Image: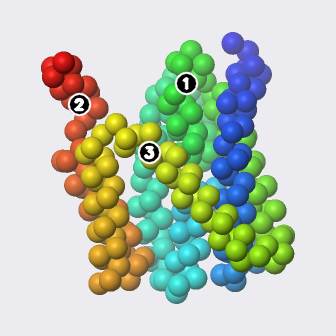
Amino acid sequence: MKKSTAYLNGVRVALPVILGYLPVAIAFAVMASEAGFSRLEIIAMSTLVFAGASQIMAVGMIATGASMLSVVVATFVLNLRHFIMGSYIMKRLGKTSTIEKLTTANGITDEAFAIIGTTEDEKCSVPYLFGIITVTYGSWVVGTALGAFVSMLIPASLSDALGIALYALFISLLVPKIKRSAHLITLVIFTALLNAVLGLIIPSSWAIIASCLIGALVGVFFVPDEDDASKETEVAK
């Protein structure tokens, strides 16, 4: 397949992501503006960092007076999943140069991971991934810039409504996976409850970090491997 064709295929399959990214990016920009960030700082953060959930969490923590150490640790823990996602994507892409790995690594997001994970092997390629990243990165930066310049014009009620888009985006990524596993559903509920309880005892920023780490540790022993689970299902049949 030609590189240009693969690139355009990547752009095409990623277009629906725009519907989720734009409102979340606008909500982030509004939140950052209310937290005292300048327009330049808001746009620069999305342009250089490109990590929606981490950006939103970092801005929220900074707005509540959290220490920079807790912000750095929390965002690091939240982004640990990228080690796994990046390794998986690079494996699916096959033989790639170091330059290609470095240039695509910063564009890997949950949505890009989900798209690559559901794409046939013969279609997975670096140009295909670049097409996906063009849409995801472009829509996030454009949405952020739009939000930064119209934040003062957006009513508080609309700003709150846009913020819900983030949770809707997370849920849309989470539900397809957990609905097939009672163990994962239980783990998600456990982690959420743990965060709520710890938030009553320690600062919320550290509660997030602790609950994520404890939830991940519990998941290692509690959630069965997919291969083992499929074998158990076949035996049961």
The quadrant in which the C terminus is found is top left
In this orientation, does residue 47 appear?
A: no
**Left or right position of 22 against 74:** right
Residue where numbered disc 3 is placed: 175
Residue where numbered disc 2 is placed: 229
Badge 2 or badge 1: first in the primary sequence: 1
Rendered residue at 61%/39% (across/down) = 104
Of the residues shown, which amino acid type is indicated by label 1?
Thr
SS of the residue at dot 1? loop
Q: CA distance from mark 3 to mark 1?
A: 19 Å
SS of the residue at dot 3? helix
Rendered residue at 25%/25% (across/down) = 230
**Dot 2, how many residues are within 10 Å of its Cα: few (below 14), some (14-19), or many (20+)?**
few
- The disc label shown at residue 119, or none: 1
The image position of residue 177, as x and y in percent, is 40, 40
**Dot 1, how many residues are within 10 Å of its Cα: few (below 14), some (14-19), or many (20+)?**
few
Of the residues shown, which amino acid type is indicated by label 3?
Val
Q: Nearer the viewer, mark 3 or mark 1?
A: 3
Q: CA distance from mark 2 to mark 1?
A: 23 Å
Q: CA distance from mark 2 to mark 3?
A: 18 Å
Vertical order, 219 against 3 (above or below): below
Q: Nearer the viewer, mark 2 or mark 1?
A: 2
Of the residues shown, which amino acid type is indicated by label 2?
Ala
